[in-house]
Amino acid sequence: MFMVCAQLKDKTGDLISHSCRSAMLHYRSSLLITLKTLVQAPFLILGGYEEKQTLTLELFSEYEEDQNHPVTDIYIEVQSRFIHIYSASIHINAALSGLRYVMFTWPLLSAVLGISSNLIFIVFICAVSWWQLYGPKEDLRSLFFYGRLRSLATSDEESFFYKEDDDNDIINLNNEDSSSSSDNEYEDAEASKQISTLQSLQVVPEN
């Protein structure tokens, strides 16, 4: 078992972050090594195979870089004297989400969509500006209010006509009531005249 450490530094040499992870090679007995060497001897002689082991270590997880102090240098330290290293590489996996993930994963599609949306927005702004400068002088807002006023006037006229018809009906009803009441009064007057005549006929003057 051995330790692998990593140091992150900025351009001024200040230490930003530090991490260490333990690692271990797979154990192989001497008998297994001898048998494997005899079986793979042709490939080892021809150079198609090498006696090596590949290890993968995650030194930093969920690391967020400071924009004021960006990392410019990475120092890797293997704390062991018995390990021989053929080659080493560093892989940085960006854990992105949302729009950044789309732009990082599909850059060509993101570029086409972004440029197209910008062009459409610019064309729309130019069209609106041209309409304001060289379009008809009549404002759309005034047309809207004019149409609104016309609709209100139409509704007022209809309500006025309905009200006038109702008033005519009321006048006709009043006329009918007055005519019927006048007829009743006339009949009452005739009846009272007849009663007074009968009373005068029934009264006989005394001699």
Image (cartoon, rainbow, N blue to C red):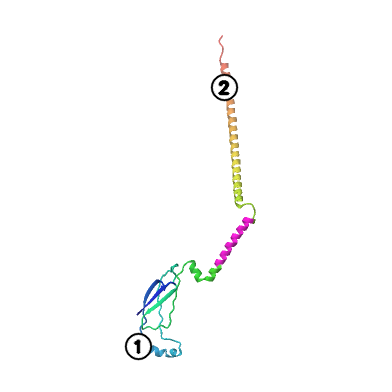
Residue sitting at 40 percent across and 74 percent down?
7
User: In the rendering, at what x and y percent does residue 62 appear?
Assistant: 41, 70
The span shown in magenta is 113-133
* Mark nearer the N terminus (2 vs 1): 1
User: In the rendering, at what x and y percent does residue 136 appear?
Assistant: 65, 54
Residue type indicated by callout 2? Ser
- The picture quadrant where one finds residue 40 is bottom left
Query: Position of 14 compared to 118: left or right?
Result: left
Tell me how far mark 2 sits from mark 1, CA to CA.
Answer: 151 Å
Q: SS of the residue at dot 2?
A: helix
- Disc assigned to residue 100: none
Q: Which residue is mark 2?
A: 192
Query: Position of 62 compared to 159: left or right?
Result: left
Up/down of 129 relative to 180, above or below: below
Identify the image quadrant of the C terminus.
top right
Q: Which residue is mark 1?
A: 30
